[in-house]
Amino acid sequence: MRADIVPGGTFPDYELTDHTKKRRRLSELQGNDPMVLLLSRGHYCPKDNQQHLKLAAVQSEFAVAYTRIVTISTDNIVTTREFRASVGANWTFLSDAGRKVQKDLDIKEYTDPYHDPMVPHTLVLKPGLVIYSLYNGYWYWGRPSVDDLRRDLREVTRDIRPDWDLGAPGFREAWDAGDHSQFFHDEDADPVLRAL
């Protein structure tokens, strides 16, 4: 892994083609929310399938927690689409069949010349693609469990959401005075806030 890809560093804002054949930038997919980024071997790998199945089982938790998930694999578009469908994921899968990410990050899995995958990694990213944590998943137990991700995402969310503790001094007074600038809201999802 490239030396600058460490906690506190910024992950590159790659632009790749998604499972619908649309070009997407990581920063666009992340928006202002935390993101779990999976750098995957691809559909052929049973370890990747298992990890994705576990995340798919709790993907509704990520949705209500305003947390994005994105997978990048070295699969082509058709296989990327099949991978996504086979694990029941509803998040974005990006195809890096040209191995741009693998080469740029220096994560070629040289022990598998047949598939030529990247060494799988899982990253938890703060807004701005800032790396909070990084897991090397070459061996399955190196990958984060859902509980590991929950702990990381709890800390990330506590750090980026000023209104983490509504009981903190001054928050109620600010809200009552009409100052909602310190409060997170998704105007598209909350009709009450749209009316304010």
Image (spheres, rainbow, N blue to C red):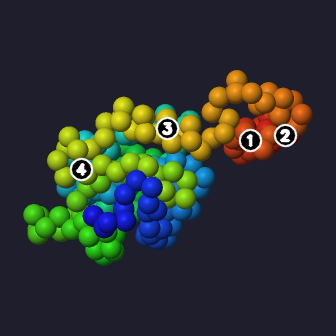
Say whether disc 2 or disc 4 marks the residue closer to the N-terminus. Answer: 4
Q: Secondary structure at mark 4?
A: loop
**Residue located farthest toward the front when viewing the structure as drawn:** 169
Say whether disc 1 or disc 3 marks the residue closer to the N-terminus. Answer: 3
Q: Residues within 10 Å of mark 3 (few under 14, many from 20)?
A: few
The image quadrant that residue 183 belongs to is top right
Left or right of 23 in this view: 178: right
Q: Amino acid at mark 2?
A: Asp
Q: For mark 3, what is the residue?
A: 155
Residue 154: % across, % down: 49, 35
Q: For mark 1, what is the residue?
A: 182
**Residue located farthest toward the top when viewing the structure as drawn:** 167
Q: For mark 2, what is the residue?
A: 179
Spatial CA span between label 2 and label 4: 44 Å
The image quadrant that residue 179 belongs to is top right
Say whether disc 4 or disc 3 marks the residue closer to the N-terminus. Answer: 4
Q: Amino acid at mark 1?
A: Gln
Q: Nearer the viewer, mark 2 or mark 4?
A: 2
Q: For mark 4, what is the residue?
A: 137
Spatial CA span between label 4 and label 3: 22 Å
CB under 8 Å between discs 2 and 3: no
Q: Residue at x 70, y 24 (%)?
A: 167
